[in-house]
Image (spheres, helix red, strand yellow):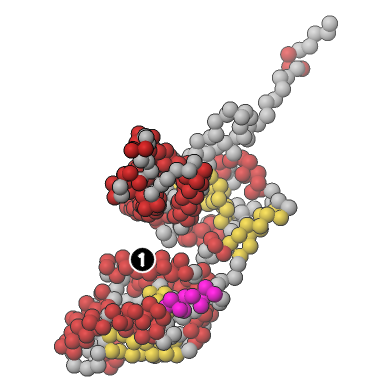
């Protein structure tokens, strides 16, 4: 037997772990981001309580003998109460979970969470109907309808309130968010930084940038967060306390680099997101089409024609007609206040640029003294906005009653006349004065839709926004509008008007 030195025989090198569980019994890795755990637990408890409460209310509202059992015929009330207060809430939770209503990717942002709740509600109603039919159970339609519809409405309301609290925590305290490390070239990373920090309530907080084009690319450039280069990305994320890696644009020219990064992150609990060079495009217009392992982003054209636009126009005119009839008494009171404050016309009509560049005269309640146009030249140097707008917070040309009308947005109500005539819409980009010069470049795209009484610009800051930000929001609306989006903006307008935010 030949003696073999110990160094000649080496134990087999164990495979480098890549985080993939090797056993069916292995527990999945815990996410580095943990804010969603207590938030999800709170949602589960609230959803259960809401369904049980709605069942109780429905039973109390209607006769118990027709609420699902008949005691005189031998029905067991204990079983019925078990179903109403335990099994039905549990069924709701199971279907909410199955539809992804507790998925951390959809919590606190966008409309996906609410759509999944509605989908779960429809499935609950279908399941209850099927079970009642299969077991020949006599149920009170009023009781069941009240319990199911009431549960869905209250769950949606609870989700909205919970989301508002989450946004407040993110905005005021800076907690319950995702700490992101941006990976890519410096221009791409800064563009993504600018986009994700526009809305603090989204909870996306960049903490570092790892540039792939060398540290020399960042010399002499001031950056909002520290910049690194030539580091192991996973080690850097752990060093800065991050929980998400955002790959910005084309982070690497080497094929397969992104796939290898995804492999490296398996089992680490670190999220990986990809931010392509495609901004201000809403989710419904973007679809992933995997072809031979290559995920292609298919971008749909904006909905600028068709049945949806026809429905929008019909809804605008019907709402304008009803609104004008209902607001006649208020219009009379405002007219009296204006004539008392300053003799002159009640309405102010000014040429504005509308749909496809057509000029029309917008209707507004007059809020300035009759010599306001003559005094404008002496106030130009006090303009507090940029771009094509003239705004100053304490405009001396505005009389006291007019200041109230502007703060409450009541001066805009006569524009319902423009909506009724088809010159404007309830929701859209604000019409700009026709004498402010040509609409060049990207600004001309605002003219592809009818201007609106309210819009994304108004619910996002109004006069407090810069001209560039206002144009960006208007173009985002043009590219991504839908009837549901219009209703959302109308709802947000109510809160903005009551808060008098950015109105002067």
Residue lying furthest front: 73
The residue that appears at 19% across and 83% down in the rendered structure is: 333
Q: Position of residue 179 (x, y in %)?
A: 46, 47
Residue nearest the viewer, comparing 65 with 89: 65
Q: Is residue 206 left or right of residue 50?
A: right
**Predominant SS along the magenta part:** helix
When the figure is inspected, residue 399 is found, relative to residue 131, above or below; the finding is below
Q: Position of residue 7 (x, y in %)?
A: 73, 17
The residue that appears at 40% across and 76% down in the rendered structure is: 426
Query: Does any portion of residue 159 appear in the rendered image?
Result: no
Q: Position of residue 266 (x, y in %)?
A: 59, 39
When the figure is inspected, residue 384 is found, relative to residue 166, above or below; the finding is below
Q: Is residue 430 left or right of residue 396?
A: right
Where does label 1 land, which residue? 492
Give the residues drawn in magenta, as a range: 307-316
Residue nearest the viewer, comparing 247 with 336: 336
The residue that appears at 42% across and 90% down in the rendered structure is: 360
């Amino acid at each position: 037997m030949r003696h073999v030195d110990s160094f000649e025989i080496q134990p087999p090198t164990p495979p480098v772990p890549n985080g993939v569980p090797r056993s069916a019994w292995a527990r999945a890795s815990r996410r580095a981001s943990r804010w969603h755990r207590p938030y999800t637990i709170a949602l589960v408890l609230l959803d259960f309580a809401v369904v049980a409460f709605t069942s109780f209310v429905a039973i109390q509202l209607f006769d118990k003998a027709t609420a699902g059992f008949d005691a005189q015929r031998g029905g067991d009330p204990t079983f019925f109460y078990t179903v109403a207060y335990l099994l039905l809430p549990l069924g709701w939770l199971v279907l909410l979970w199955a539809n992804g209503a507790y998925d951390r990717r959809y919590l606190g942002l966008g409309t996906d969470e609410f759509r999944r709740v509605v989908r779960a509600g429809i499935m609950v109603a279908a399941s209850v109907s099927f079970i009642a039919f299969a077991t020949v159970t006599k149920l009170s339609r009023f009781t069941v309808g009240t319990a199911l519809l009431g549960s869905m409405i209250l769950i949606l309301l609870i989700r909205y309130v919970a989301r508002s609290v989450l946004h407040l925590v993110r905005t005021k305290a800076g907690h319950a968010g995702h700490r992101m490390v941006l990976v890519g070239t410096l221009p791409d990373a800064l563009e993504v930084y600018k986009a994700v920090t526009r809305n603090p309530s989204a909870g996306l907080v960049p903490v570092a940038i790892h540039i792939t084009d060398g540290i020399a690319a960042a010399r002499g450039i001031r950056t909002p967060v520290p910049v690194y280069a030539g580091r192991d990305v996973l080690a850097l994320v752990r060093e800065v306390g991050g929980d998400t890696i955002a790959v910005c644009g084309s982070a690497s020219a080497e094929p397969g680099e992104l796939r290898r990064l995804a492999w490296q992150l398996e089992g680490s609990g670190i999220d990986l997101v990809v931010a392509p060079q495609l901004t201000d495009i809403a989710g419904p217009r973007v679809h992933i089409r995997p072809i031979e392992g290559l995920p292609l982003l298919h971008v749909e054209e904006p909905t600028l024609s068709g049945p949806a636009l026809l429905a929008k126009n019909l809804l605008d005119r019907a709402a304008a007609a009803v609104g004008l009839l209902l607001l006649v008494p208020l219009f009379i009171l405002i007219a009296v206040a204006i004539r008392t404050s300053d003799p002159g016309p009640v309405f102010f009509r000014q040429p504005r640029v509308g749909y496809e560049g057509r000029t029309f005269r917008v209707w507004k309640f007059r809020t300035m003294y009759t010599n306001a146009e003559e005094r404008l030249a002496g106030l130009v140097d006090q303009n507090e906005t940029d771009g094509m707008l003239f705004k100053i917070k304490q405009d001396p040309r505005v009389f006291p009653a007019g200041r109230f009308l502007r703060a409450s947005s009541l001066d805009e109500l006569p524009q319902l006349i423009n909506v009724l005539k088809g010159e404007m819409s309830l929701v859209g980009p604000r019409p700009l004065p026709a004498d402010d010069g040509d609409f060049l470049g990207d600004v001309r795209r605002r003219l592809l839709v009818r201007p609106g009484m309210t819009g994304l610009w108004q619910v996002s800051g109004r006069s407090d926004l810069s001209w560039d930000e206002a144009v960006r929001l208007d173009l985002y609306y043009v590219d991504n509008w839908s009837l549901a989006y219009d209703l959302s903006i109308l709802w947000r307008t109510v809160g903005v008007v009551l808060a008098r935010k950015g109105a002067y």
